[in-house]
Amino acid sequence: MKSPSKSALRGKWVLITGASSGFGAAAAKAFGAEGAKLLLGARRVDRLEKTAAAAKKAGAAAVHFHDLDVSSTASVEAFMAWAHPLIQGRAKTGRLHVLINNAGGAHGLDTVAQGRDEDWEVTFQTNVLGLLRVTRGALPLLPHHAGATILNIGSLAGRVAYAGASAYCAAKAGELSITRVLRHELFGTGIRVSTVDPGLAETEFALVRFKGDAQKAEALYAGTNPLVAQDIADILVWIASRPAHVNIDELLVKPTDQADMGKVYRRS
Ligand code: NDP
Ligand code: 8X3
């Protein structure tokens, strides 16, 4: 692994939403290992505390965490009111280098005919509106012409359709669309915008989708060789470390054993 002293991310501020588990927690550790300064948000603060300790141990220059519910404008505004002075520092010159819009997930696997409003609403609130709210709050802190980066987490589900995922597919297609819109809106600022779109990855994603049913969640991954959170974290660090003139626009990442949505090779 590269020494933090040589990393382009050393001493740079990185804000990660959904840092209490899965990709977000792994990203905190990976950016920490690069010597970055971290701001972490999620609803489960006890889990953020564990992420923060792991990131600090990995080499983070600073780690701060705060309760964040991206589905609430008030919560995002409170989070930003906390984050801004930390980033700006006393001299008010500090800037955010990387924003990782990762918080999200799927809720239920019902068909449209059986679908529930509350599942659809939370899916859009987190994956789409949450991303918009957090980005709006962070944009004033992103410097122009400095290789600053917005990294959005999309999904294979945003590019293909499958039964039972109407709201989730639409939400992640929305995330892809917002990423492309931001490329236009931020044209000429030097701020980079990327989407990383994973396929099957073993995190707490399935547990959330199946509303805590561990058996169903385990069955999804049984016999497969899925992506793990570290795979995505490494990719996020790689993207943010490219030279400032390079924008990795869209990256679709699947396990070798996944040819398509629902086409996953299961080894006995
Ligand atoms: P996890 O369930 O492990 O992590 C989800 C994270 O999002 C948690 O930290 C959770 O924190 C946070 N989160 C959820 N809702 C909110 C909210 N309202 N406010 C703030 N934070 C929230 O799953 P993953 O790591 O897999 O998921 C991360 C992202 O990756 C999601 O956007 C997901 O859609 C996407 N993705 C996942 C794939 C997979 O197969 N695992 C594949 C493709 C994309 P807390 O509950 O503490 O608030
Ligand atoms: C998560 C991937 O295949 O469960 O975004 O929709 S999938």
Image: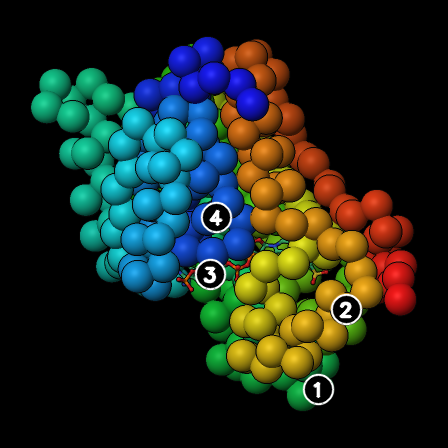
Residue 193 is labelled as: none
Q: CA distance from mark 2 to mark 3?
A: 28 Å
Q: Amino acid at mark 3?
A: Thr
Q: Earlier in the sequence, mark 1 or mark 4?
A: 4
Percent of width and height locating residue 242:
58, 17
Q: Does residue 158 appear in the picture of this structure?
A: no
Residue at the spot of label 1: 113
Residue found at x 78% / y 48%: 255
Q: Earlier in the sequence, mark 1 or mark 2?
A: 1
Q: CA distance from mark 3 to mark 4?
A: 14 Å
Residue 126 is labelled as: 3
Question: Circle 4 sits in a helix, a strand or a loop, which is it?
Answer: helix
Q: Amino acid at mark 4?
A: Gly
Say few, some or many: other residues with alpha carbon within 10 Å of mark 2 (under 14 / 14 to 19 / 20 or more): few
**Left or right: 220 in relation to 49:** right
Question: Circle 2 sits in a helix, a strand or a loop, which is it?
Answer: loop
Say few, some or many: other residues with alpha carbon within 10 Å of mark 4 (under 14 / 14 to 19 / 20 or more): many
Mark whose residue sits in front, 1 or 4:
4
**The CB of the residue at mark 3 lies under 8 Å from ligand 1:** yes
Say few, some or many: other residues with alpha carbon within 10 Å of mark 1 (under 14 / 14 to 19 / 20 or more): few
Q: Amino acid at mark 2?
A: Ala
Mark whose residue sits in front, 3 or 4:
4
Q: Does residue 28 appear in the picture of this structure?
A: yes
Say few, some or many: other residues with alpha carbon within 10 Å of mark 3 (under 14 / 14 to 19 / 20 or more): many
Residue found at x 68% / y 79%: 216
Q: Residue 84 lies in what quarter of the image?
A: top left
Answer above or below: position of 263 versus 77: below
Number of numbered discs visible in the structure rendering: 4
